[in-house]
Image (cartoon, rainbow, N blue to C red):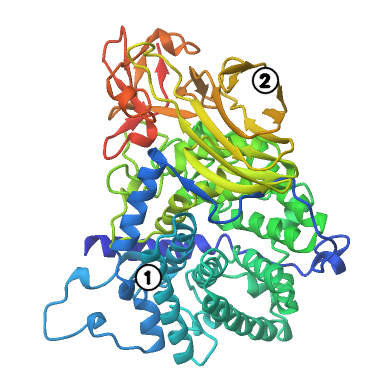
Amino acid sequence: MRKFLFATAFAVLGLVCNAQIIYINDGGNTSSNSAQAFEYQKDITPALKHFETGKVRLLPSLFQQRFALNYNYMMSLSSDKLLQNFYFEAGIKKDNLIMVGGREQNLEDFHWGWESPMNQLRGHFLGHWLSAAAYIYASTGDMSVKAKADHIVSELALCQQKNGGRWCAPIPEKYLDLMVAGESIWSPQYTLHKTLMGLFDMYKAAGNRQALEILDKMADWYVDWTDRLVKAKKENMIYGGETSGMLEIWAEMYQETKDKKYLTLASRYGNPSVFQGLAKGEDALSREHANASIPWSHGAAKMYEATGNDYWKSLTEKFWKCAVHDRESFCTGGQNAGEHWIAPGQIADFTGENNQEHCTVYNMMRTADYLLRFTGKFEFSDYMETNLYNGILAQQHPKTGMIAYFLPMGAGYSKGGEKGWGTPTMDFYCCHGSLVQAQAKYAQIIYYQYDGGILTSQYIPSEGETEVNGRKVKISQNFAAQTWNKDPYMPRFRMIFKVEADGDGEFELKFRVPSWTVEKPTLTINSQNVDCQTKDGFIVVRRNWKNDEIVLEFKDRLYTKQLPGSDKYAVMDGPIVLAAKSDRQVVVKGKKDKPETFLSREIDQQYRLVRWTQSHYRTIGQDEPQVFVPLYEIGDEKYCIYLDFK
């Protein structure tokens, strides 16, 4: 109950925070060609595209382990409890969801925290769950998750029918009217967006047609609601309630259906103040709520895909510049504290307990994915790797699979910050939702296809299938087995690729060269050395691939990254942040730019047996010995990332 009270108190705090981040549409032009901004202009040819959904599967590895943790957790949740708030809103009675009765109420009878029936954000988690379930099914073909998700969609259709045929939500319609009237309502459009997103993913990735029908009817409700606001000259209120995800879902639906009502909705959500500031070249982000702003970049990117209007692409690129290039980041890739963007030049002042909200990590990776596909540029792929290891993996408990809402950058804290680790049924933070999605979508960011070739963006054991120049191609990758008895310091990133292709004709394989590698990569094809040339961050090999084996090796290294504006440094092992297991600030004697002067690698038989296990280190020559491990391995221990030096 104490956890429930805490969650409720945080909801009240959220009301206050939200008042600072509502985006206002000033009614000005969206762009110099605003009349065309929301109309189709041309088909675009992105530099890259994903492999077809369901054509990539994970192989045994750290990533498959974390995927399985997430899968098992998701399947453990009761469908009725996931739907509890939709049932309550629709007036559907379920005997196992009665809050008063002839027995003592048990906490296990309901989902609590942000999902409790008294919380204004209730029901948001189900949308995330549906999105994750759709992608789990797509990447595994698992019919048990498909059946569970299809059942939930059918129950949502029943709730929609009971609510009059359009409204399908876990909160009452009046929440939006109260919000327009100036009442403090906690982000109703955030909650609604998650349901719409989950339904769309169930249709697109899991083939559930009923999900699309529910979404389409809910869109009719939105058309009428925004019509009323436009007629009442209250267009600005459309942007109330952390609404940044809405532009993307309407653009998705327009691209999918070509129904003009979705362009109408997109136009009503398409000119937030953050776009106005970015268009003027201003810093539109500093001190703003981070996760209330990032989804706007997704909306702009999807509008570019749906309409071909370069204005939307330029907005996405300007967002990236403002978010990433114009401000510093932590060594993990995070850039926020207390859920807000840190202003340029101030990041050293904000290392504390509540850094790097998980939702922001996941959503910034989604922005990077859009821009990687638009441009094919190395920086977006490299950015995703840093955040993958030091955010997505690091903020999932390695044993329980639960979420760390925050990832502290200050010394001596535990993961989760002031919230601690989430629990299976008592919290359901926003980050709880982005966690289950992130852990379900590894397969989406590994391989990309372009005209005449395949790009390997992330080095994750997997196998994929596609067609290139009319040829059916299978590609797989895995870590090479560790030869502990011969070479205890063999690089972890020694990857073995296998390629099978039917027919004849040359095509390219492109491999990202990570920014952390210290030497020129080595490449063999069928045991023959190849002098690989790197261009723009990638190795490109063109040949008539048939049935070939490629060994690609990147020499990793220990190096340090300075906390900008301070004299503190973090230690990196390739793309991975190392953390000292310590309940205080760690001070070391050694050279700041040479970790080998104070760290020694542990040698253990397990590194031969489990090929994806990362190295551990111990300090040498120190007054207080310390153990350093990958940040993603830290569970309940307190830790220190940034070191002081004597």
Residue extending farthest left? 103
Q: Is residue 355 left or right of residue 542?
A: left
Displayed quadrant of residue 248 = bottom right
Q: Mark 1 is on which residue type?
A: Lys
Residue neighbourhood size for the residue with mark 2, other residues' Cα within 10 Å, grouped as few (<14), some (14–19), many (≥20)? some
Decide: is 569 above or below 181: above
- Could you say where residue 83 lies in the image, as x and y percent from the top left? 37, 75
Residue 407 visible in this rendered orientation of the protein: no
Instruction: Name the residue at 77% across, 47% down.
Output: 281
- Could you say where residue 447 lies in the image, as x and y percent from the top left? 59, 43
Per the model, the C-alpha gap separating discs 1 and 2 is: 48 Å
Circle 1 is placed at which residue position?
148
Instruction: Name the residue at 70% across, 29% down.
Output: 540
Q: In the drawing, what numbered circle is on residue 621?
A: none
Residue neighbourhood size for the residue with mark 1, other residues' Cα within 10 Å, grouped as few (<14), some (14–19), many (≥20)? some
Q: Earlier in the sequence, mark 1 or mark 2?
A: 1
Q: Mark 2 is on which residue type?
A: Cys
Decide: is 246 above or below 223: above
Which quarter shows the C terminus? top left
Q: Is residue 253 left or right of residue 196?
A: right
Circle 2 is placed at which residue position?
532
Q: Secondary structure at mark 1?
A: helix
Q: Secondary structure at mark 2?
A: loop
Residue extending farthest front? 503
